[in-house]
Image (cartoon, coloured by chain):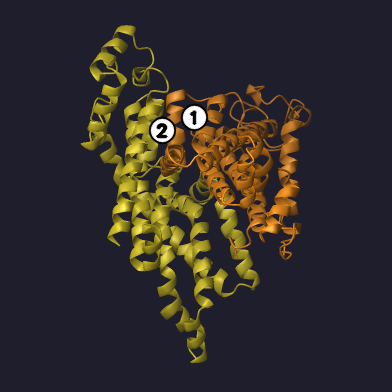
Chain colours: A yellow, B orange
Amino acid sequence: MHAFLIKRLIQAVIALLGVATLIFFIQHLSGDPTLLLVPEGATQEDIDALREALGFNRPLIVQYLSYMGDLLTFDFGRSIVQNVPVMTIIGARVPYTLALAGGALVVALGIGLPLGAIMGLKRERWYARAAMGVALAGQSLPTFWSGILLILVFGVTLGWLPPSGARSALSIIMPSVALGLLTMATFARVARTAVLDEIGKDYVRTARAKGVNTRRLFFRHLIRNGSIPVITVAALEISNLLAGAVIVETVFAWPGLGQAAIQAIAARDFLVVQAIVLLGAFVAIGLNLLADLLYSVVDPRIRLERAR
Amino acid sequence: MTSRTANLLAAMLGRTTDDGADRPARRRRSWRPVLPFIVIFFAFCLMAVFAPLLAPADPDAQNLLGRLRAPGTDVRGEVFWLGSDELGRDLLSRIIYGARVSLFVALLSVLISSVFGTVLGIVAALNRGIVETIIMRLVDIVLSIPAILLAIITVAVLGPGLQNVIIVLAFTRWPRYARVAYGQTLGLVGQPYVAFARHLDVGTPRLLVRHILPNIIGPLVVVATLEFGLMVLFESGLSFLGLGVQPPTASWGSILSTGRNYVSTAWWIATFPGVCLFLLILSVNLIGDHLRDRLDPRSWR
């Protein structure tokens, strides 16, 4: 167990350092990172002064070390455009993105799991096949289109929900649905596989032979044993939801991190973009680690296999 | 070494090569259920290739008298079959030309990333040690950044535009192919015929083309098909965010972005490009799923 834990932790740390290095490399792809940070129409003197102030005129290796040092202390720098620390900008946006991801997860689990269970339990019925079709279609639905359709139907035509922004509590419903539909299919697939895996096992046959009815069998046995892969996949899917939030937030003018990133690109506020991407990658790596650990806690076979 | 000698050698050693000739015939899924989607996919391809012949109007020609007209409106002899946008451009023509952008970007980015990724994957598998470690660690790192975020930061640095979108997509997606090519090649390196070929001092290019590539191409084609759908989605997503193809060039994503702004007055702008996008992605995904099932029946029960 310890060997696996330590190995996995070291891998995660390497991945974190690697991601930070890759972003540093991308930052220097343009030749002069200073140009990414100045508003359009800046004079040459302004650019030179800023380059001096930010230290972009130092040797690359020195820049790299100071960049990594800043990251270790969670210092993402100061936004040139808005003249506040990047962390302040991000801090104000985080609650919105978390709320959206949470809402989407509720939608995805709430629809995906029952759908998957039906697909697994009643495999041959027409409605199980129809459910499969719905799940597949949901996966191919671009969030920016499903989002607009939701606005069109529920915001504009029916007028039930606010079409965009975050002014009322109802505002979160449509973005959550648009984002949740994307991962719904994944949960449906996992739930279906989990049910099919469990249903073929001996204890199910025994329970059936004892006369346990399907409902009790499902709620008492299948859900408990089948939830293991679902929890693991949920940990992985959260990072997908956070990434998908970039587009959904833009569609619904939801003031989260994704919208902040897109606005920052338009305003040439590169440090904000960089911080949000780094944060997203760090969260993804963390969740990946969490999924692996969760799995190894509940299923000892895995840690034995992977520790080797 | 020809593949016939490989077969002979394998037969001698009591193993089979990977052409499946002497395996029990696998129950194959019929193509019939996906046939309509293959037709849809090729219809979009034809639409893209013959766009200049099919489009009723110039996709970029503005008609300020015919702004935001509903589908079927006739403005001085010009019929807007699917309506017009905020500058009076014919939506149908823009959608037809938009198929070009979608398919061109997807095709090129899949081609570049698959060749790049496959080569790196095979190189890593054939050169165990430091080369392998560097390549496969890089694969892990790139894959650990959510793809859309990596694409966004790269566009932020390089700037938007058709060419940069292709570069960005190729740059962010090659690790998928590298991982598959690496795994598949590792499996082959242990095969006696590869060891034999190496022993006979067959040059590396020949080893790759004659012995390794034909045996690993199947799973790579599946990855490429599924990635193709994803690339269509990414291009339109980036264009929707204003980071992709720049105006006035029509892209389904950028048309949808306009549609979002006029959603309360002109429903058609946000509807028709979305239908096309959905159908294209759905058909590519279903074709990819089907290919995967044929190659690996265990992956989806």
Q: Pinpoint residue A110: horizontal percent, then vertical percent.
A: 44, 63
Which residue appears farthest toward the front when viewing the image?
B200
Which residue appears farthest toward the right when viewing the image?
B53
- Give whichever of A17, B204 is nearer the camera: B204
Q: Is residue A111 above or below residue B142?
A: below
Q: Is residue B194 left or right of residue A40?
A: right
| Neighbour tally class for label 1: few under 14, some 14-19, many 20 plus, Cα within 10 Å | many
Q: Tag 1: residue type?
A: Leu
Q: Which residue lies at the image location 69% right of the left edge and 40% below the top edge?
A: B210
Q: Is residue B246 left or right of residue A245?
A: right
Q: Are marks 2 and 1 on the same chain?
A: no
- Give whichever of B291, A262 is nearer the camera: B291
Q: Tag 2: residue type?
A: Ile
Q: Pinpoint residue A285: horizontal percent, then vertical percent.
A: 36, 47
Q: Real-space Cα distance between discs 2 and 1? A: 9 Å
- Give whichever of A211, A171 is nearer the camera: A211
- Give whichever of B123, A22 is nearer the camera: B123
Q: Quadrant of residue A236?
A: bottom left
The quadrant of the image that shows the C terminus of chain B is: bottom right
Q: Chain of mark 1?
A: B
Q: Which residue lies at the image location 51% right of the left edge and 49% below the top edge?
A: A150
Residue beneath disc 2: A262
Q: Is residue B230 above or below residue A33?
A: below
Q: Pinpoint residue A116: horizontal percent, then vertical percent.
A: 52, 66
Q: Are marks 2 and 1 in contact (CB under 8 Å)?
A: yes
Q: Pinpoint residue A107: horizontal percent, then vertical percent.
A: 44, 58
Q: Chain of mark 2?
A: A
Tag 1, which secondary structure? Answer: loop
Residue beneath disc 1: B243
Q: Is residue A105 left or right of residue B12?
A: left
